[in-house]
Image: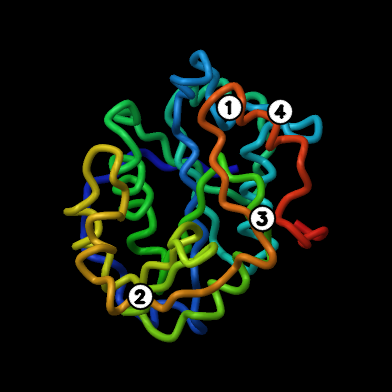
Amino acid sequence: MESAPSASPASPATPGARSGATVAGLLLAAGGGRRLGGRPKALLDFRGRPLVEHAAAVLRDGGCHPLHVVLGASAELVRARAELPGCVLVVNRDWAEGMGSSLRAGLASLVGTGARAALVGLVDQPGVGARAVARVLAAYESPSSLAAATYGGRRGHPVLLGAERWPEVMTDAVGDQGARTYLRRHEREIALVDCSDIAAPDDIDTPEDLRLLGRPSGSGDPDA
């Protein structure tokens, strides 16, 4: 696996740096699991392996390339325990500031890769599988694309961010908001992709949520 340090916001790579519409997978996996008693979410057990392995495979199997995984809490332990072949690991040393810092670090790490968009997934949603990723990925049209999965009419992940949008997204990504502020401001531009029939967006935040780790990934999604 490759590694990349946290990076400062910058302008995205010029579209066309690679042939084809390259959409990168960006997995946010830096959380420390405060409400889980300090158990890093990336290392939660899922089918006998760290959850981060499953989440990365979902992005890969859904058609994303390259794959960048943002680590934070217990990053070195995650490196030691998880097998993430072909993934670029981005260490966000400011992970405790919230999801916004991880999104900034992840998007900054994609600058210069030739990716024309980033499809953002969260490590703590085991019910979102590869079919949901592929469905949102299909909404890509250009480096200005903006799309998100919906569940029962509510917007969720994965979210597709065209490269032309990255600088503004990074400016808005503060605290635990992630891309929420940006998405609210550009609500009318979002291509909404219903994934209710193939995935479930439940987050693992509390000890009670650990039951989700025993459920198949995505309702009706046996391949995830």
Q: Number of labelled discs?
A: 4
Return the residue at label 2. 190
Q: Which mark is residue 174?
A: none
Find the distance from the CA under tag 3 to the CA under tag 1: 18 Å
Find the distance from the CA under tag 2 to the CA under tag 1: 34 Å
Q: Which mark is residue 58?
A: 3
Q: Mark 2 falls on what kind of element?
A: loop
Return the residue at label 4. 45
- At label 2, counting other C-alpha atoms closer than 10 Å, the crowd grade (few under 14, some 14-19, many 20 or more) is some
Please tell me whether residue 38 is drawn above or below residue 187 in the rendered image. Answer: above
Q: Give the mark nearer the N terminus: 3 vs 2.
A: 3
Q: Position of residue 210 (x, y in %)?
A: 65, 28
Q: Give the mark nearer the N terminus: 2 vs 1.
A: 1
Find the distance from the CA under tag 4 to the CA under tag 1: 12 Å
Mark 3 vs mark 1, foreground winner is 3
The amino acid marked with disc number 2 is Ile
Mark 2 vs mark 1, foreground winner is 2
Find the distance from the CA under tag 3 to the CA under tag 2: 23 Å
Please name whichever residue, 209 or 43, is drawn nearer the observer in this view of the structure: 209
The amino acid marked with disc number 4 is Asp
Q: Mark 4 falls on what kind of element?
A: strand
